[in-house]
Structure formats: structure tokens, C-alpha cells
């Protein structure tokens, strides 16, 4: 007897209501959890959610869902298949619902938006996400589940270890984009991951929700790895395969646009490498030759001498280096305050640099520079304020002028840092709540 087809279930909806500033950075709130329209607490009998983000994937979505359901049936793992639809217009939602998947429409557009909405709505304790283009083998997820059950918080697939089929990854992605961006991520964040952008990965749902991921584009993949690494989560890798996708249209990924978005994300989340290290290198690169030339010219050979012109360049390098280091300090403090980066050792060191501390340092630089300029003017007056010849007087004058300029930069940067640390809307809301509680207690 033929099985009667089940009626398609009406899809649940993830809404995006207006949120207070305090809730705007809560991923569950942003994607509907706080409204009760899309979030389901992990069910006691649901261990795994296989999450498939979708935007017009009618060609390949059915195969992905069948493979995911087959894995759940064959492995005996209690779970669900969840399709986070990002506004498909090709009937993908109906295909998914007819095959027995749960469909969650997510209004926030973008790869990261769809995934964040799906994670918020997942019912499983663990989530394994895989693309809807049939390029990953969703029937072979045992390695991910094994590592998750063993205590891993994030399990990344590694396509370079598992195997990449012919035509599955463009040449630029395979030999330039992925290796370079992964190397940068490993260097900047000390991450153990060797394939930053693998779309097949599993994770503990509560742990990932706790990271407060915020991006909505393709850089969501990098953000998950970066934030997990910075937070000290247990990260492991397992080999996985990649085959050529089954779509007849181009992929959503755009090589240069999305590559830049990944690189931009990595750089903006590493003030040390973006500001601190380059600034220190520039400062030291100027300070060493400046000190060497402070007493007079240096002859490096019969036809090569370093004199006042090199000294000027060295002093400017020191000045610019100080400014870049100051930018790094401000960026690091701001990122920690916004919850983008953990406090850590560097955060504690920078936390000791208050507005008053920086102003004292600026005053000392100003005093030293002013004294140097005063001495130079006095020495000049002894010559009858005539023409300045040679570098004996110019060197201390230039160095003193740079000290004054650095003091001005540091002072204004200190006040900028103070402005960034003023109590914001969250603090005002907490203060208002405290006043209300005190008033109620007194009444």
C-alpha cells in the first residue's frame, strides 16, 4: 500500500523585532529567541540538529536533507534536520517541509544571519552545520558526533586532510584564499584550526550561543573560529571530504568580496597585530638610528654617510609609531568593553592605563620637549640668532619638537579613550533600575 504523503508543515518564523541596546548583541534575541517565535530549548530526546542554511537551493536541497535523515536513521542518533531559509523564491521551503525537515525562515539576510537564526532555533544539544549545495557528505558525520560527545566545543572539518574532489574548490580558493586566510587566523589568534572556512562543522549549541556571534555575512565562519579560540573553547578537527556541488548556477560566495570581508574581520579583531606590533616596530626602527645619530653623523663607508636628514626621518618614524601604538591601546580597550575581545593579560595591562596615567605621561613628554626647545633657543641666542649651521643644534631641537608633538597626540588620545569609556545606555538602564529598587525599598 502506498504511504500517504504527509501535509507540508507550516514553517515557523524567526522575526527581527526592535531590540534595546542591551539585547541588540544577544544572538538569541536578534534572531527571534526572545519573542518566543523561533527558539526552542534543547529537547531532552534531541541530541543533534543538522542545520542547513538555504537560499534558493531547490536543485540540491532534497539530496542534502535525504542524506542528513539517512545519517540520523542509520546512526541511531536522536535528532532533527533544520533548514534555515533566508528568503528562497524557488520553492526550497516546500521541498524541505515535504521531506520532513523543520523549516525556519530567517529574515536577517546573509549566510551568517541564516546560521545564527538556525542555531537559535535548534532543538539539539549539538549542531552540525553543512551547506545546501550537496558538496559535503552529510551521511558521514560520526567523527563530528564522537568528538562532541568526548567534550569538544567546536569540531571543524578539514577538507585538506580529508580530500578535495576535482573541480570542488576553485584554484584561487584552494592555493591562495583558504591557506593565506587560515595562516593569518592561526597567527593572529593562536588558533589550532587548519581550515578556517570549512562549511561542515559541529559544535555545542550552548557554547556557541554564549559567544555572542554578530556578523551576518560569509565572515560568520571566521568569527566562529576566532571567538571560540579567544574564549578558550575546546576545538578539534576531523578530516572531511569536499566534492563538486550539484548546482547549475554560480555559488553565493564571491571570491574577492568575501575574501576581503574575512581578512577585514581578522584584522579588525586583532589590535595587537593591526596597531601594537607595527607601531612598536616603527618606533624602534626610528629610535635606534635616532640615538645613533644624536651625537653626530655616522659614516658607513667611503660613499655612505647618515646625517641630519636621516635623523629627521627617524624622529618622524618614532612619532608615527607612538601614535599607532596609542591607536592600538584605544582599539583594544574599546573591543574589550564591547565584548568583542576577552580581557586577558593584555587587557589587564591596558586597563591600568587610565586617562590620568596617560595625561601624566603626556605632561612628562611635554616637559622634556619644552626643556629641549628652551635649551636650543638659549644656545641659538648665544650665536646672535644667526644662521643655524651643522646639526649640533638641530638634532636636539628636532627631537624636542617631536617630543612636544607626541605629548599633544597622547593627551588628546587619552581624552578620546575617556570618552569611549563613558557609561552608555546599558549603564544608564542599570542605574535607573537601581534607583527604582531603592525607591521601592524605601516606600
Image (cartoon, grey):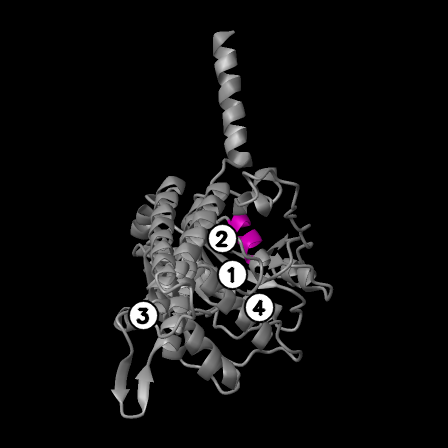
- Residue picked out by circle 2: 213
User: What is the x, y in percent for residue 410?
Assistant: 42, 51
Q: Seen from this angle, which residue lies furthest right?
A: 89
- Rendered-image quadrant of the N terminus: bottom right
* Label 2, label 4: how far apart the Cα atoms are: 22 Å
* Label 1, label 3: how far apart the Cα atoms are: 57 Å
| Residues marked 3 and 2 touching at CB (< 8 Å) | no
Q: Which mark is residue 392?
A: 3
* Label 3, label 2: how far apart the Cα atoms are: 58 Å
N-terminal of the two: label 2 or label 4?
A: 4
N-terminal of the two: label 1 or label 4?
A: 4
Element at badge 4?
loop
- Residue picked out by circle 4: 132
User: What is the x, y in percent for residue 259?
Assistant: 53, 72
N-terminal of the two: label 1 or label 3?
A: 1
Would residue 203 be visible to someone looking at this image?
A: no
Q: Residue at x 43, y 59 (%)?
A: 323
- Residue picked out by circle 1: 220
User: What is the x, y in percent for residue 166?
Assistant: 49, 87
Q: Seen from this angle, which residue lies furthest bottom?
A: 302
Q: Which residues are magenta?
A: 115-122
N-terminal of the two: label 3 or label 2?
A: 2
The crowding category of the residue bearing disc 2, from other C-alpha atoms within 10 Å (few below 14, some 14 to 19, many at least 20), is many
Determine the main secondary structure of the stretch shown in magenta: helix
Of badges 1 and 4, nearer the viewer stands: 1
Q: Quadrant of residue 429?
A: top right
N-terminal of the two: label 1 or label 2?
A: 2
Q: Depth check: give the residue in front, 164 or 390.
A: 390
* Label 1, label 4: how far apart the Cα atoms are: 16 Å
| Residues marked 1 and 2 touching at CB (< 8 Å) | yes
Amino acid at each position: 500500500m502506498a504511504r500517504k504523503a504527509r501535509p507540508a508543515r507550516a514553517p515557523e518564523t524567526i522575526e527581527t523585532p526592535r531590540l534595546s541596546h542591551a539585547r541588540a548583541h544577544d544572538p538569541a534575541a536578534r534572531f527571534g529567541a526572545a519573542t518566543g517565535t523561533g527558539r526552542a530549548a534543547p529537547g531532552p530526546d534531541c541530541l543533534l540538529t543538522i542545520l542547513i542554511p538555504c537560499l534558493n537551493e531547490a536543485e540540491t536541497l532534497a539530496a542534502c536533507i535525504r542524506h542528513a535523515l539517512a545519517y540520523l536513521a542509520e546512526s541511531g542518533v536522536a535528532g532533527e534536520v533544520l533548514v534555515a531559509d533566508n528568503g528562497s523564491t524557488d520553492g526550497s521551503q516546500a521541498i524541505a517541509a515535504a521531506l520532513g525537515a523543520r523549516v525556519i525562515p530567517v529574515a536577517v539576510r546573509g549566510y551568517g544571519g541564516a546560521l545564527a537564526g538556525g542555531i537559535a532555533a535548534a532543538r539539539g544539544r549539538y549542531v552540525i552545520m553543512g551547506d545546501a549545495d550537496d558538496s559535503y557528505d552529510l551521511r558521514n558525520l560520526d567523527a563530528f558526533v564522537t568528538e562532541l560527545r568526548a567534550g569538544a566545543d567546536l569540531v571543524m572539518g578539514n577538507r585538506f586532510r580529508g580530500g578535495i574532489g576535482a573541480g570542488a574548490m576553485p584554484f584561487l580558493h584552494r592555493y591562495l584564499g583558504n591557506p593565506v586566510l587560515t595562516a593569518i587566523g592561526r597567527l593572529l589568534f593562536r588558533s589550532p584550526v587548519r581550515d578556517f572556512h570549512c562549511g561542515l562543522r559541529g559544535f555545542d549549541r550552548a557554547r556557541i550561543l554564549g559567544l555572542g556571534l554578530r556578523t551576518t555575512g560569509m565572515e560568520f565562519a571566521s568569527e566562529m573560529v576566532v571567538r571560540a579560540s579567544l574564549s578558550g573553547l575546546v576545538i578539534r578537527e576531523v578530516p572531511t571530504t569536499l566534492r563538486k556541488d550539484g548546482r547549475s548556477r554560480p555559488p553565493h560566495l564571491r571570491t574577492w568580496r568575501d575574501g576581503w570581508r574575512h581578512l577585514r574581520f581578522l584584522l579588525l579583531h586583532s589590535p595587537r597585530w593591526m596597531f601594537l606590533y607595527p607601531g612598536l616596530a616603527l618606533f624602534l626602527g626610528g629610535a635606534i638610528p635616532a640615538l645613533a645619530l644624536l651625537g653626530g653623523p655616522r659614516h658607513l663607508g667611503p660613499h655612505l654617510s647618515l646625517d641630519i636628514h636621516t635623523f629627521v626621518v627617524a624622529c618622524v618614524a618614532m612619532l608615527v609609531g607612538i601614535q599607532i601604538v596609542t591607536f592600538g591601546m584605544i582599539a583594544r580597550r574599546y573591543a574589550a568593553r564591547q565584548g568583542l575581545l576577552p580581557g586577558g593579560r593584555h587587557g589587564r595591562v591596558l586597563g591600568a592605563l587610565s586617562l590620568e596615567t596617560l595625561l601624566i605621561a603626556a605632561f612628562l613628554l611635554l616637559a622634556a620637549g619644552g626643556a629641549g626647545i628652551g635649551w636650543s633657543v638659549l644656545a641659538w641666542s648665544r650665536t646672535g640668532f644667526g644662521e643655524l649651521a651643522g646639526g649640533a643644534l638641530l638634532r636636539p631641537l628636532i627631537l624636542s619638537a617631536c617630543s612636544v608633538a607626541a605629548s599633544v597626540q597622547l593627551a588628546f588620545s587619552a581624552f578620546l579613550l575617556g570618552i569611549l569609556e563613558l557609561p552608555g545606555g546599558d549603564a544608564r538602564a542599570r542605574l535607573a533600575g537601581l534607583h527604582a529598587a531603592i525607591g521601592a525599598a524605601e516606600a
